[in-house]
Image: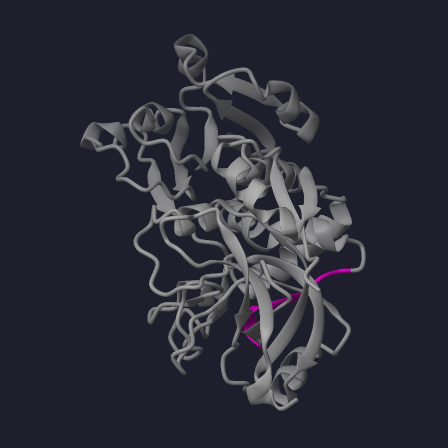
Amino acid sequence: MSSSDTVFKGYGITDANRWSDFKLVDIKPKTWEEEDIDVAVSYCGVCGSDIHTITGGWGSIQELPLVVGHEIAGTAVRVGSIAAQKTGVKVGDRVGIGARCNACGVCGPCTSDNENYCVKGPIDTYHGRHPDGTMTQGGYSTAVRANHQYVFPIPDGIALEDAASMMCAGLTMYSPLIHNGAGPGKKVGIIGLGGLGHYGVLFAKALGCEVYVFSHSTRKEQDALKMGADHFVVSEDKENMARLRGTLDLIISTVNVVDTFPLAEYLSLLVVRGTFINVGAPETKLPQLAAFDFTPNACRLGGSCVGSKREAIEMLKLAAKANVKPWIEVLPMSKVKQVAESMKAGDARYRFVLQQDIV
């Protein structure tokens, strides 16, 4: 079969009004280039981004059918000559792909290990557009084609099913931790214990931090402590919140709640020049702030969006060394409708991972 005849298969949405009605569809990948790697999908994590996209929460779907999924772990089955030269990846190697599959490669961020912030806009692994006009399709599929810069080697010490959700959720938490001084002696707060938040706990502990988990109820307290959290704080307990004022070096928020989110109260928990980082991506605007919500302790507010290849490789090495084990539930990819609906309902504990079963 010639390169132009290559066809992958995947579970895609074919009707924007039926967001959980997945059908098996053919996928025509982008035009092959020698900088590309084809990855046969073994496992694909189910990310909240997948649900925001297929439900239209982040805007209308550009083109149907759409196959989502950007927490991909599998095996390299085709490696371009340039990709092989630059990465050393060989056919048969265990590799992963995250939320991006390409970018311009020449801008400041792309040439400084910050390609996830490409000024021309990185190309998303699904629901993006390749330069040849092809719509990108994701990992609820047999295979994905990506530029080598966005294909990450997976250490032998990590099972592929565990590595899958690290490609987005894990990296989304690891990157702001290392960029904001997480390490021994630092107190880190994680707001929300979902797929992202649980990785926040796992990686903050692997880095040697003292970890505080904030949640609106005690429902997940025992899980948080089993994951390694040192403290569990119910955010609606105003006395406990008040006792923590001025004590945390870093807070990372993973939640999508906006209308009841006490942002100003969380900022007051930071030490002088402490940092609040948002990685959650709600479908509406964040709460409005007054100047005196952040000037009394000179705190910093920022955001973070997944991470770079360099960070992904570092993260995976740390996960292998520290035996970071995500809390996942593995199901056949053919159960994608059930899994997507459960994910939207908030039932994941703490990440669903689909095992590729397309024949």
**Pick the front one: 263 or 180:** 263
Q: Position of residue 139 (x, y in %)?
A: 58, 61
**Pick the front one: 118 or 8:** 8
Q: Is residue 141 visible?
A: yes
Q: Is residue 179 visible?
A: no
From the viewer's perspective, is 224 left or right of 18?
A: right
Residue at screen point 42% across, 71% down = 135
Residue at screen point 42% across, 8% down = 239
**Pick the front one: 30 or 318:** 30
- Taking the view exactly as shown, the residue that stands out farthest to the right is 157
**Pick the front one: 355 or 210:** 355
Residue at screen point 41% across, 14% down = 236
Number of numbered labels in the structure image:
0
Quarter of the image containing the C terminus? bottom right
In the figure, 29 relative to 66: above or below? below
- According to the image, what is the colour scheme of the structure? one colour
Q: Position of residue 134 (x, y in %)?
A: 42, 77
Q: Which residues are magenta?
A: 148-155
In the figure, 301 relative to 70: above or below? above
**In magenta segment, residue 300:** no
Quarter of the image containing the N terminus? bottom right
Residue at screen point 38% across, 79% down = 133
